[in-house]
Image (cartoon, rainbow, N blue to C red):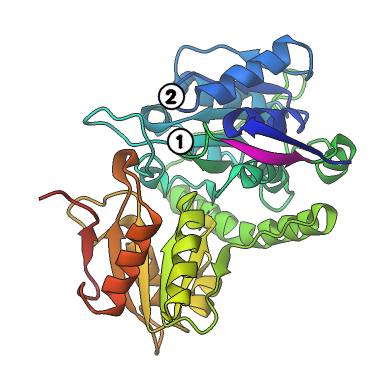
Amino acid sequence: MAKRVGMEVALAVAEAVGQCNIDMAAVYPITPQSHIGEHLSDLVADGKIDAEFITVESEHSAISAIIGASGTGARVYTATSSQGLMLMHEILPIASAMRLPLVMGIANRAVSGPLNILNDHSDIMPQRDSGWISLFVENGQEAIDLSIQAFKIAEHKDVNLPVCVNIDGFQLTHMVEPVEFPDQELVDKFLPARVPFATLHPSNPVTMGAFSMADYFTEIMKAKDEALKNSKKAILDVWDEWAKMFGRIYKPVETYKADGAEVLILTMGSMGETAELAIDELRAQGVAAGLVKLRLWRPFPFTEIKEVLTKAKKVLVTDRAVSFGGPGGPVFSEIRSALYSEAVRPAIYNYIIGLGGRDVTVTDFVDMIKKVANDDIKAGTYEFWGVRE
């Protein structure tokens, strides 16, 4: 029987990672990720999981340590947030280029300056092109499920790429929610022992991360791009297997009351549940509004996005990060680009919301959608929502 408890989401993530029979973790503390690393270290210290927990001097060291361990064939995990993720930045493309199946939990948090410890997505967006599979969760149960699934995806024989699981800091990590832990026997069945493609060992020397001149570098980058694009099939297969075993369905693009909607609002992360309440309220008022939730950020789900969004007249994309000096938020830019070549496409609008942990209420979402429906914001442009005058 699955175990259902009330637990802080960050602790639940650590418990879920513990169920994955990891061999090693290296985590440096940073708010609001610290509870993941702290609880995982407790699980190791208390003998509840048979793994090594390495205390490192920085996030740069953490990602470097798990790369080395993964190269030996170990199942590895790390977690970070904000400036810690920025410190890892130089190493992230190395992990994907070396085709190492790492898993990292990211407690998303605003990037300085000014210093802010609360949630938005400005830490993950600069990592967009690092070659990692990138998933977003909406609630505590999803944080558990996707943390387990991430290992299965990363280690899939047709993938062998690092995976990051984005979990909104504080707004999700520090909330106590009712969650269900899958039975350990089923997790073991779903996630068998890792079978590495190649391993570092003194008795059988191999080279990983070798130097490349211009005559091969382009081909290597193309191979990396193809690997990430092709990982989508494996991701869908893993989600299908999860649904059959545990009954919870995951898709690259998920919707709520989108059928027949003239205006769709798109969210990523925990604000989707708040937006659902706004859709309920608008539908009750006779406004044909619906919600689209983008779960798979990389590889980008072009087919699913086009299928859903081209049915609406207007699409409002919300961003929780700023592309300074650009045409709008990073998600907005991606969506607009994805729809550009479509013969029939909706008018697209962009609100940048919830920066630095600013609250976005049901009323805010209702007002955003009404402004789009009433043409109170110009199509193809972006605005910062709720800026004080």
Decide: is 282 above or below 277. below
Q: Residue at x 34, y 63 (%)?
A: 332
Magenta stretch prevailing secondary structure: strand
Quarter assignment of residue 315: bottom left
In the rendered image, is residue 101 in sight?
Answer: no
Name of the residue lying farthest toward the bottom: 343
Please, what is the three-letter code of the amino acid marked with disc 1? Gly
- Residue type indicated by callout 2: Thr
Query: Which region shows up in magenta?
Result: 176-181
Say whether marks 1 and 2 touch (CB < 8 Å): yes
Q: Is residue 29 left or right of residue 115?
A: right
Question: Mark number for residue 54?
Answer: none
In the image, residue 302 above or below residue 128: below
Mark 1 vs 2, N-terminal side: 2
Query: Residue 72: x percent and y percent?
Result: 70, 26
Q: Is residue 178 magenta?
A: yes
Q: Point out the image quarter for the N terminus.
A: top right
The residue nearer to you, when weighing 90 against 216, is: 90
* Marking on residue 31: 2
Mark identifier at residue 169? 1
Residue situated in front as seen by the camera: 152 or 206: 152
Quarter of image, res 285 = bottom left
The answer to whether residue 284 is seen in the rendering is: yes
Q: Residues within 10 Å of mark 1 (few under 14, many from 20)?
A: many
Under circle 1, the secondary element is: loop
